[in-house]
Amino acid sequence: MQHEIYADHAATAPLRAAALAAMQPYFGADYGNPSSLHAAGARAAEAVRQARGTMAALLGCGAREVYFTSGGTEADNQALLSGAEWGAAHGRRHFVAAAFEHPAVLRTLNWLETKGFSVTRLPIPQSGILVPEAVAAALRPDTAMVSVMAVNNEIGTVQPTAEIGALCRARGVWFHTDAVQAAGQLPIDLQAWQADYLALSAHKFGGPKGVGALLARREAPLSPLLRGGSQQRGMRAGTENVPGIVGMAAALQQARRDMPQDAAAVCALRAQLIEGLSAIPGARLTGDVRRRAPGIVHFCFAGVESEPLLVLLDAAGICASAGSACSAGALEPSAVLQSMGIPPAWAAGALRLSLGIDNDKEQIEYIVQNVKRIVTDLREKTA
């Protein structure tokens, strides 16, 4: 076995050198609390201010529209619950969402249903791409919010966020997009997308774990999830995670600067991987072959189960997954694949491989060879 090959970047990406370097002073000498009035606190507050400005410039929004969170889950929750609070006050208790949203969205919507809200979950075509017309048809006079992710976290397909955002703006409906898998892979622009809320998580694009951001347009209603101190204009109480915030901004800056060449390199590896895996008998690519994030490839293999496939790939030194890391260990079939109408016999053999700039052509060849070998062996054992 060769050294470990990491092909699970959609679960978490390696920490970028720029992020680590930016964070280090705030683990050491510059440890002040940004809410303190002394010089040490002022230095920390300035670091947070600069990071907020950097992110705003990269994401097409104002600095006052950036709120730092513990990650994408918190950001999704705050957006949805803010929309719900506004909706309850205005007699609009209906939500529309893609049926293959991340659990941070779907389970929050499930909870809102227990509180008297209604939710329309839109089925997904075999392409893995929701069409704006489906969103338009689901809107009602009492619709408060639409939530559609920018890039699906399991199959990697890119959704028409700008078109859906324009539709929602024209109909007077708040629009939230979970852009966790888009950040670092695709350009993000809150204004161009006409999104009212947008969620990010730093560790998906080479920042540290445990920090993220919610972009909330000034006109959009925002309610705090956490109540306490007056940090972040009272919208997110708690001492700011200064090292994490600084590292996230540095990672996003590097990712955005290097995006053209990185995306081209990863797309070439993706094409090599899709070509190699498609040649395996009984292999099926999930979703559109082209309109997907550079690094995410998802296949289903007939006559194979994901768990033994992943175990044997791990034994061969390949880190992969069946789908969302947030659903790892779940016994039920993937909600994403169910929403697309993929038959259970195919969904049982799901494999997600997500690539990054640390992968190369030789690794892709090794992955293809081993997937083919393992799939063949597993089928022979169950024949």
Image: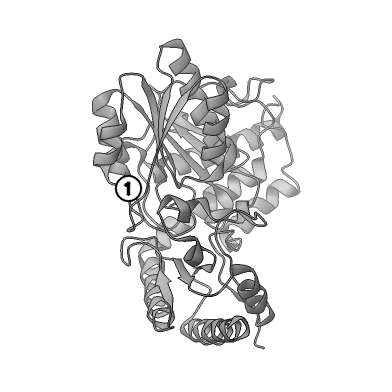
Residue 154 in sight from this viewpoint: yes
Please give left or right for residue 173 compared with residue 41 in the image. left
Where does the image place residue 143, in percent across and percent down from the top left? 36, 23
Residue at image coords 35%, 43% = 189
Quadrant assignment, res 325:
bottom right
Where does the image place residue 190, in percent across and percent down from the top left? 36, 39
Residue at image coords 65%, 54% = 330
Query: Closer to the camera, 268 or 251?
Result: 268
Examine the rendered structure and indicate whether residue 281 appears above or below residue 357: below
Total numbered badges shown on the rendered structure: 1
Please give left or right for residue 219 compared with residue 168 in the image. right
Residue at image coords 66%, 79% = 312
Examine the rendered structure and indicate whether residue 121 appears above or below residue 238: below
Where does the image place residue 106, in percent across and percent down from the top left? 52, 39
Residue at image coords 66%, 20% = 227
Task: Spot the residue most to the front.
Answer: 383
Residue holding disc 1: 130
Query: Closer to the camera, 323 or 197?
Result: 323
Query: Closer to the camera, 285 or 46?
Result: 285
Q: Amino acid at mark 1?
A: Leu
Q: Residues within 10 Å of mark 1 (few under 14, many from 20)?
A: many
Quadrant assignment, res 294:
bottom left
Residue 49 in sight from this viewpoint: no
Q: Quadrant of the C terminus?
A: bottom right
Q: Quadrant of the N terminus?
A: bottom right
The structure's colour scheme is one colour
Quadrant assignment, res 60:
top left
Q: Secondary structure at mark 1?
A: loop
Examine the rendered structure and indicate whether residue 90 appears above or below residue 41: above
Where does the image place residue 174, in percent across and percent down from the top left? 37, 27
Please give left or right for residue 329 compared with residue 104 in the image. right
